[in-house]
């Protein structure tokens, strides 16, 4: 298993990052929270990883890497996808709308409403997540003090990220129009996407 990849950050956007290591460029699917913690292009970067191998009847075997800024986020991701009904993309959306600590806090406090705000999570799925994972995280304390730097990104980048995350472009455009009427013009791409995810 590939537990982490460390090298030069050659490309990044809110949905994925490419790290060059020993002449090989690794594309890792990331959450919005991990994106916000990445450095600048060309800087050294380390992401904890989780390898996914999908084998479906209608498609060839697919191999994907998911990257995380912290081991805590990776652990939460792996726990989420262990719940029936929670796929890889849904887990990534959850970790884009919520931090790993917020997920843990919602689990420990059995706060179903927090999960229901995430696109694709209904009442039954939220209840199942809490039922199956609460005991696993009860003894863990959320990590605090993570600083999230601000980025000057435009609305088009946020829109592109929503499309990459699986939302139809026309629906994403309408969401961004609503976001534009609510948030300040100088809002960061993270703020734009997080707000959009709440209304999609």
Image (cartoon, rainbow, N blue to C red):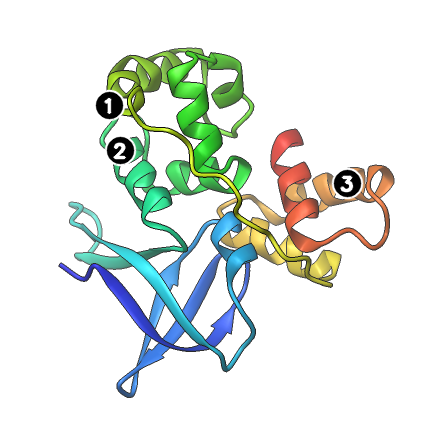
Quarter of the image where the N terminus is located: bottom left
- In percent of width and height, residue 48 lies at 31, 57
Q: Give the side of residue 47 with respect to residue 59, left or right.
A: right
- Mark 2 element type: helix
**Circle 1: is it few (<14), some (14-19), or many (20+) Cα within 10 Å?**
few
**Circle 3: is it few (<14), some (14-19), or many (20+) Cα within 10 Å?**
many
**Circle 2: is it few (<14), some (14-19), or many (20+) Cα within 10 Å?**
some
Which mark is on residue 170?
Answer: none
Q: Residue under label 2, please give it.
A: 79
- Mark 1 element type: helix
- In percent of width and height, residue 159 lies at 65, 53
- 77, above or below 41, in the image: above
Q: Residue under label 1, please give it.
A: 136
From the image, state whether disc 2 or disc 3 is nearer to you: 2
Observer-nearest residue: 139 or 179?
139
The tag earlier along the polypeptide, 2 or 3, is 2
Q: Quadrant of residue 28?
A: bottom left
- In percent of width and height, residue 31 lies at 46, 49
Label 1 close to label 2 by CB (< 8 Å): yes
């Amino acid at each position: 298993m590939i537990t982490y990849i460390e090298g030069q950050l050659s490309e990044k956007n809110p949905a994925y990052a490419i790290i060059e290591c020993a002449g090989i460029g690794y594309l890792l699917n990331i959450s919005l929270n991990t994106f916000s913690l990445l450095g600048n292009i060309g800087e050294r970067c380390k992401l904890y990883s989780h390898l996914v191998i999908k084998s479906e009847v209608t498609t060839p075997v697919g191999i994907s890497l998911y990257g995380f800024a912290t081991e805590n986020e990776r652990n939460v991701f792996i726990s989420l996808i262990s719940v029936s009904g929670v796929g890889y993309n849904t887990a990534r959306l959850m970790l884009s709308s919520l931090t790993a600590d917020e997920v843990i806090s919602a689990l420990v406090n059995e706060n179903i409403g927090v999960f229901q705000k995430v696109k694709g999570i209904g009442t039954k799925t939220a209840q199942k997540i809490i039922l199956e994972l609460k005991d696993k995280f009860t003894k863990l304390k959320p990590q605090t003090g993570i600083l999230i730097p601000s980025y000057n990104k435009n609305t088009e980048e946020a829109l592109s990220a929503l499309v990459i995350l699986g939302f139809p472009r026309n629906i994403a455009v309408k969401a961004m129009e609503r976001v534009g009427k609510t948030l300040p013009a100088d809002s960061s791409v993270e703020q734009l996407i997080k707000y959009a995810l709440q209304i999609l």
